[in-house]
Structures are given as structure tokens and as C-alpha cells.
Amino acid sequence: MARSAAAPPSALDPTTRRLILLLPAAFLAHDLGELAGNDEVNQAAHDLLRRFPILAQRALPYFTTSQAQASVAIGTLAAGVAMLSWRAARSAPGSPAMTTYAAATLLLGAHMVPHAAQAIALRRRLPGLAGGLMVSLPYSALVIGRLLRHGLVEPGALARATGAGAALLVPVLLGVRALGRSVA
């Protein structure tokens, strides 16, 4: 039974509200691992682009970051994720805030697939992958399943929001990296 978009935020059961508020922790389980292994990620980019020297000169600056730059970028994204989570926990089921949160959660889990593919292609264990596969991916699957089962988000709206979020993901990531470069 789907809940109405006009339902009060209190219509969320306490377990769902707590799960929603855990999104920043699921995000950080992956991204703090990437931050801790930033030098390894940079080395992997250098190794990959060494195989393609023409691309390396142009692309390498976009694929590598200093520790400070990565910290600013991840901190900015973490703040955004925390805000999405907080808004969703306080919003009504079926609301745009809930749908946006669900799309972000779905993208968090789904983006572990390309990370795993990168590790396979590079033939190395990449930082953040373990946290992503052990925490972020299961968290996303659990929460999305719960939101859909309880009718807290509409599948069509979730699909549209996820598509829009995926299209915006690259510009957002490039933007936070640029912010990290300008600040750090």
C-alpha cells in the first residue's frame, strides 16, 4: 500500500528514519577508504595512463588529486549527502526530498560496480572498494528495498530521479574536484 505524498514526516517508522540518517556513514565507509589510499589511486591512474601516453598528458590532471584536494572534495560531498539524508528523514513519504534521497542512495550502491570493474581492469585492490562492497552496497540495497516495499518512494519517480542524478554525477564530481584544487 503506497503512502500519500501528503503524509506527515511522522509517517516514517523509526527504523526507516534511522536507516535514512545512516547514509553519510555508508558514504564515508567508501570515501574515507579512498581518501586514506589517495596515493594508491593516483598511482593507479599514472599506471593506466602510461599505457595511453596521448591521453596521459591531457587526462592525468583530472584523475589525480593531492590529499588536501581529495579531503575538500570528499568533505563537500559528505556535507551534501548529510543534507539529503537529514531532509529525507524529516520529509513526507513520496516527497521530492525522499525521492532525491533514494536516488542518491541507489547511485551510491550502483557506483560500486564501476569501482569493482576498475579494480579488475587494473589488476589491483583499490582503496575504498572493501568499504564500498561491505557497507555502501549492502546499505543501498537494504534501504532502497525498504523504501520501495513500504511505498515510501514511487518506482517511476525513483527511476527518473536516478537517471537525472546519474547525468549530473560527472559534472558534480568534476565541480567538487575543482573546488578541492582551488581551496587546497
Image (tube, rainbow, N blue to C red):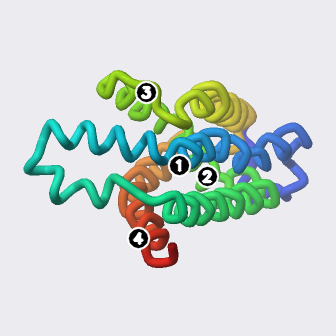
Q: Residue 167: x percent and y percent? A: 36, 55
Element assignment for label 1: helix
Residue 115 in view? yes
Front residue of 4/63: it is 63
Camera-near label (3 vs 1) is 3
- Disc 4: CA contacts within 10 A as few (<14), some (14-19) or many (>=20): some
Camera-near label (1 vs 2) is 2
Is 21 situated above or below 74?
above
- Label 2 with label 4: CB-CB less than 8 Å: no
Element assignment for label 4: helix
| Residue under label 2 | 99
- Label 1 with label 2: CB-CB less than 8 Å: yes
| Residue under label 4 | 178
Residue at 77%, 57% (x, y): give it.
Answer: 92
- Chain-order first, disc 3 or disc 1: 3
Measure the alpha-carbon separation of dots 2 and 4: 28 Å
Measure the alpha-carbon separation of dots 3 and 1: 28 Å
Q: Residue 31: x percent and y percent? A: 58, 46
- Image disc number at residue 133: none
- Image disc number at residue 157: 1
Measure the alpha-carbon separation of dots 1 and 2: 7 Å
Residue at 79%, 49% (x, y): give it.
Answer: 21
| Residue under label 3 | 116
Front residue of 2/132: it is 132
- Chain-order first, disc 2 or disc 4: 2
